[in-house]
Image: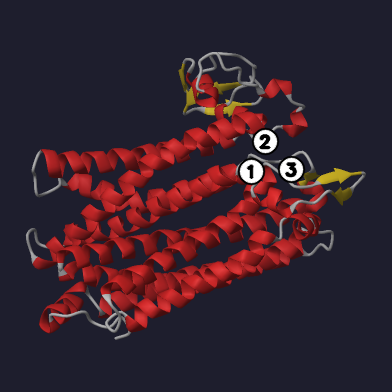
Amino acid sequence: MDELVIARSLFGTTMAFHIIFATLGVGIPLMILVAEIMFQRTNDLDYSVMAKRWTKAFAVLLGVGIPTGTIAGVQLSLLWPGFMEVIGRVMALPFQIEIYAFFVEALFMSIYVYAANRIAPWMRIVSLVLVAIGGLASAVLITNVHAFEGTPAGFEMVNGEITNVDPWKAFFNPSFFVTAGHVALSAYVVGAFTIATVSAFKMLRASFGSRIYKFHQKSLMICLLVGGVFSFFTAINGHESAQMLHEYQPEKLAAAEGLFETQTHAPLAIGGFTDPVEREVKWGIEIPWVLSFLAGNSFDTEVIGLNDFPEEYWPPLFVHTLFNAMVGIGSLLIMLSLIAYVWNKLLKKDRFPKWLMWSFVAGGPLSILAIEFGWIFACTGRQPWTIYRILSTEDSVTTTGNIAVLFGLFVSVYAILAVAVVLVLLYYFKRNPPEKDISKAEGKEKDIPLST
């Protein structure tokens, strides 16, 4: 197999694995903060128990996210020396600042875990806010490098030499804010719906109206509320992302929609697959004029088709399917939240039908799948470039060879880590069911230390 393909497969596998823990590492702290605020506002001990249990799960996930993130960093240097040469001279700021973001996250999570019952309530809120900010900053700073790859700025390449370097201009590249927003919003969606999955599953197994049922019902409702709100904002941000692609990476937008002919009043293609021979989307549903409106807020907007670019510059055409899957899942999550709101708040029903409960159970895994599809779309849709129109992926890859052995070893490591984290979580929460924490909290009638 070609070394370039193996290198991309290795790094892609690493990121596909790491992004799950990185995303939950941003989303779960927000849910812990929400539960802590609810506890302090209502004095309902259930929310305090939720915050503590979610914190313990977060600690386990963080223990996997740190080493996999380190592996990804090492692989960047080993597999993509050509790319890292540019990054080292132009875009080193995010890597440098990210160290401090992680320090803030770890420090204040330790304060919350070990001193929660020894500090004032407002200090607990502040600690969790700083944990959430630290986790978000780490994710945004690292993915800003990805934003830079798609919309490079802050330097010039003259005869193969890097000149006129402006690190801050590179840092605040054109897609920085849109990408940062998408990272934050989608991570909050994943964090909320992942916890909702557990809550809904536990409700299905518990007796209706029991103490445990009500505990998980409270958890489910705040997760659906938070997840629904951020799903909606993610959709709005997705509109901004489409406009950014239209302006800076038009062939990526064309591939995402399977559009070959440049045109105004361009249709939006939903579903189907892109046929490279016939140069059309087969078995898809076309909504007239919508793509032009999404790209430029006007039906008269001209959207450039793939035929206007050399075929060697085309992204892989399967990105249309990835894009549709990502958008489809996001739309489904918004719908689930709306249905839950209508059913519970407007219709005043205290019990969801079983089919809807199983839909909530599916919400967490689907949200993670959406993250994976989106990440693959974002990176694959930029091909054949590592840095758009400046550095090709082929020119970035290492020439040392023997990557296949590393590929096999790392896949084995990830498989072991995946099994280990699942077993640890199952073992811990089986030994410490919510009944135990609830009875302990009710018995003491005060906050219980997280370190117990």
Give, as a three-letter code, the residue at label 2.
Answer: Pro
Q: Nearer the viewer, mark 2 or mark 3?
A: 3
**Residue drawn 10% across and 38% down?**
347
Q: Position of residue 225 (x, y in %)?
A: 26, 49
Mark 2 Cα-neighbour bin, 10 Å: few <14, some 14–19, many ≥20 = many
Q: Nearer the viewer, mark 1 or mark 3?
A: 3
Q: Which numbered disc flags the more N-terminal residue, 1 or 3?
A: 1
Question: Where 294 sits versus 178, above or below?
Answer: above
Question: Where 413 sits versus 237, above or below?
Answer: below
Closer to the camera, 245 or 320?
245
Q: In the rendered image, which quarter contains the C terminus? A: bottom left
Asked whether residue 270 appears in the rendered view, the answer is yes
**Residue drawn 32% across and 78% down?**
428
Q: Position of residue 328 (x, y in %)?
A: 41, 36
Give, as a three-letter code, the residue at label 3.
Answer: Trp
Closer to the camera, 5 or 213?
213
Q: Which residue is mark 1?
A: 380
Q: Which numbered disc flags the more N-terminal residue, 2 or 3?
A: 2
Give, as a three-letter code, the residue at label 1.
Answer: Thr
CA separation in Å, label 2 and label 3: 9 Å
How many marks overall?
A: 3
Asked if the residue at tag 1 contacts the one at tag 2, i.e. Cβ–Cβ closer than 8 Å, the answer is: yes
Question: Where 50 sits versus 368, above or below?
Answer: below
Q: Which residue is mark 3?
A: 385
Residue 315 numbered mark, or none: 2
Residue 55 horizontal side relative to residue 379, left or right: left
CA separation in Å, label 1 and label 3: 9 Å
- Which quadrant of the structure image shows residue 87? bottom right
Asked if the residue at tag 3 contacts the one at tag 2, i.e. Cβ–Cβ closer than 8 Å, the answer is: no
Residue 435 numbered mark, or none: none
